[in-house]
């Protein structure tokens, strides 16, 4: 693997771990302490969650797109015609859904509303993204 592919892979994995870890942390801790958080602490929490989610979204999209072409998923039928391609597509859909749910949860949190259910959904999606990544890393189908 050449240096650009290695860097894309490392950046992709680091930011995927950061965003999924942040979502799991938020879902684990926030519902338990939400009533006792001051508004400034809640605003800080929401701004950091949004920053991690949005910056990771940009970097994951860029590095993932690069890896699609670098690892010969496109052009051709590898993306839609193989088990590995289906795992990549599933990961993209799960990641997109997780990002959307995190945005919805952070909007509710910013308004001072309870976002526990959305955070739990995002955590479930994050776990599925990690499971999908594990299957891909193990060699896929």
Image: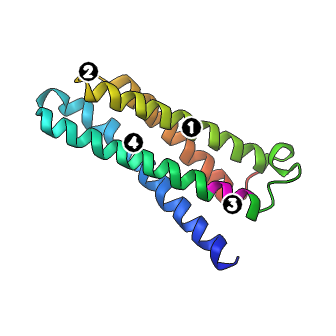
In this rendering, does residue 91 appear at all? yes
Tell me, yes or no, whether the two marked residues, 3 and 2, touch with CB atoms within 8 Å: no
Majority secondary structure of the magenta segment? helix
Residue at x-position 64% and y-position 78%: 3
Q: Secondary structure at mark 3?
A: helix
In the image, residue 96 above or below residue 113: below
Q: Quadrant for the N terminus, please.
A: bottom right
Q: CA distance from mark 2 to mark 1?
A: 23 Å
> Which label was assigned to residue 113?
2
Residue 97: x and y, percent?
A: 55, 33
Q: Which residue is mark 3?
A: 67
**Is residue 65 rendered magenta in the image?**
yes
Q: Nearer the viewer, residue 82 or 56?
A: 56
Q: Which quadrant of the view contains residue 86?
A: top right
- Would residue 47 be found to the left or right of residue 15 on screen? left
Q: Which residue is mark 4?
A: 23
Tell me, yes or no, whether the two marked residues, 1 and 4, touch with CB atoms within 8 Å: no
| Disc on the earlier residue, 3 or 2 | 3
The crowding category of the residue bearing disc 4, from other C-alpha atoms within 10 Å (few below 14, some 14 to 19, many at least 20), is many
Q: Which residue is mark 1?
A: 96
Tell me, yes or no, whether the two marked residues, 2 and 4, touch with CB atoms within 8 Å: no
The crowding category of the residue bearing disc 1, from other C-alpha atoms within 10 Å (few below 14, some 14 to 19, many at least 20), is some
**Is residue 70 rendered magenta in the image?**
no
| Disc on the earlier residue, 2 or 4 | 4
Looking at the image, is mark 2 or mark 4 nearer the viewer?
2
Magenta stretch, residue numbers: 64-68
């Amino acid at each position: 693997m050449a240096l650009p592919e290695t860097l894309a892979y490392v950046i992709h994995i680091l930011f995927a771990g950061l965003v999924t870890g942040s979502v799991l942390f938020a879902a684990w801790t926030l519902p338990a302490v939400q009533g006792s958080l001051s508004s400034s602490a809640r605003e800080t929490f929401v701004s950091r969650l949004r920053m991690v989610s949005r910056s990771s979204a940009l970097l994951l999209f860029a590095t993932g797109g690069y890896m699609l072409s670098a690892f010969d998923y496109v052009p051709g039928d590898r993306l839609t015609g193989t088990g590995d391609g289906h795992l990549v597509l599933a990961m993209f859909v799960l990641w997109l859904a997780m990002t959307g749910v995190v945005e919805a949860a952070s909007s509710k949190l910013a308004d001072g509303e309870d976002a526990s259910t959305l955070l739990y959904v995002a955590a479930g999606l994050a776990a599925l993204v990690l499971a999908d990544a594990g299957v891909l890393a193990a060699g896929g189908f």
